[in-house]
């Protein structure tokens, strides 16, 4: 039994649409939601013993908040990648380019297996498609009000079938700008402390602009210094990749390529001993000119994230006084563990 067209009734319990708000599932227009315009009693009346036992609750498909993230991590291990980049540096474009590559088939030695955030990927990828009606591909910006969220990919390694789960962070670039300027704010960026990989983006468009070049280099150097100087006990174990985006704008000038190379070498010399691993790479997630292949350089970056992490452990130092056979066995135990 349905209500009249234009009714604000929603049969989904707790949905703000029932009070004239937006759709809980994010449907636009709101009338496209299957719960909109139906009597609440159809569902709420089944809330007790009459609730069907064969109902299946699906993921919303939107980026994961903390609650959804915790639920997924209770089910399986996942590699967490914190992507640091200021506004317009290419964070969202990188995310959508990875997703777009898997829509075409196997990529970087992996096949697409699953995503808990496929709706979020699709919404952000839309402006880069012909269907959007735009003359040039675009990518929506992450808003400050969105806070921290994660995109999820489950991949199957071609050849051996091993599955890898990736969680890629998404946060407004303004937060990273403020944190590098005031390192005390780093504690608010929880994704950095939980990450298996930290990716710092160097905006290639700013490097190609003589007016903004110095500021672009400074932003990356300042962020690395904030991480390693403010919390050395944590980030000395971090695995960090500095990624120069929009390399298509830099490839046109050998002088610019030399500047980027010199900058990368200086970073490695200055911060290489302050982290567990520091490397650099260059990508063009989207080259409007078509000179570079789609997602140029992204394959190597993805393979870095999905490679097994080998942890080498030496002999354990036991507290004084522990001499049981079990303690001695632990002391003799050495080796490597793969995560």
Image: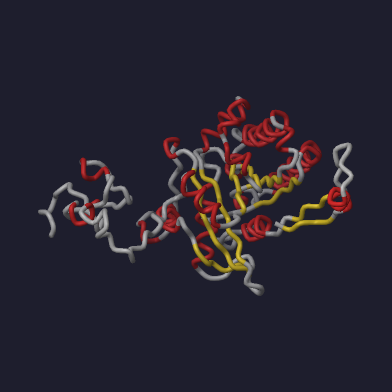
Would residue 152 appear left or right of 238 to someone viewing this image? left
Q: How is the image coloured?
A: secondary structure
In the depicted view, which residue is nearer to us: 220 or 167?
167
Would residue 308 appear left or right of 125 to someone viewing this image? right
- 184 above or below 217? above
Quarter that holds the C terminus: bottom right
Would residue 46 appear left or right of 159 to someone viewing this image? left
Residue in the picture at 19% in, 57% down: 42
- 271 above or below 178? below
In the depicted view, which residue is nearer to us: 144 or 65?
65
Residue in the picture at 51% in, 41% down: 171
Q: How far across and down, in percent of the image, does residue 218 sit?
A: 66, 32
- 27 above or below 275? below
Q: How far across and down, in percent of the image, does residue 92 sit?
A: 50, 48
Count of numbered tags? 0
Quarter that holds the N terminus: bottom left
Name the quadrant containing residue 278: top right
Extreme-left residue of the structure: 4
Q: How far across and down, in percent of the image, does residue 73 sit?
A: 55, 52
Q: How far across and down, in percent of the image, does residue 28 sit?
A: 28, 52
Name the quadrant containing residue 108: bottom right
Extreme-front residue of the structure: 324
Residue in the picture at 63% in, 61% down: 299
């Amino acid at each position: 039994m349905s209500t009249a067209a234009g009714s604000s009734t929603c049969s989904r319990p707790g949905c703000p649409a029932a009070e004239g708000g937006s759709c809980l599932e994010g449907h636009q227009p709101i009338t496209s939601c299957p719960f909109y315009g139906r009597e609440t009693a159809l569902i709420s009346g089944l809330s007790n013993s009459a609730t069907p036992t064969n109902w299946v609750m699906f993921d919303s498909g939107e980026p994961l908040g903390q609650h959804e993230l915790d639920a997924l991590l209770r089910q399986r291990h996942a590699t967490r990648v914190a992507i640091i980049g200021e506004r317009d540096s290419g964070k969202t474009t990188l995310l959508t380019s990875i997703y777009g590559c898997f829509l075409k088939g196997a990529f970087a030695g992996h096949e697409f297996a699953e995503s808990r955030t496929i709706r979020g990927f699709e919404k952000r990828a839309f402006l880069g498609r012909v269907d959007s009606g735009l003359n040039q591909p675009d990518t929506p910006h992450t808003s400050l009000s969105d806070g921290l969220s994660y995109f999820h990919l489950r991949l199957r390694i071609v050849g051996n079938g091993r599955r890898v789960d990736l969680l890629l962070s998404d946060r407004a670039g303004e937060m990273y700008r403020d944190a590098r300027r005031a390192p005390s704010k780093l504690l608010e960026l929880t994704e950095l402390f939980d990450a298996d990989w930290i990716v710092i983006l160097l905006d290639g468009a700013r490097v190609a602009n003589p007016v903004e070049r110095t500021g672009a280099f400074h932003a990356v150097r300042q962020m690395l210094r904030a991480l390693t100087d403010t919390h050395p006990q944590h980030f000395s174990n971090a695995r960090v990749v500095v990624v120069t985006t929009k390399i298509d704008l830099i490839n046109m000038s050998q002088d610019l390529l030399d500047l980027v190379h010199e900058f990368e070498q200086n970073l490695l010399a200055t911060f290489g001993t302050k982290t567990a691993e520091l490397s650099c790479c260059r990508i063009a997630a989207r080259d409007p000119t078509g000179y570079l292949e789609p997602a140029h350089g992204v394959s190597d970056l993805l393979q870095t994230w999905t490679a097994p992490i080998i942890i080498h452990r030496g002999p354990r130092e036991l507290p004084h006084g522990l001499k049981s056979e079990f303690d001695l066995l632990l002391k003799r135990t050495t080796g490597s563990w793969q995560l």
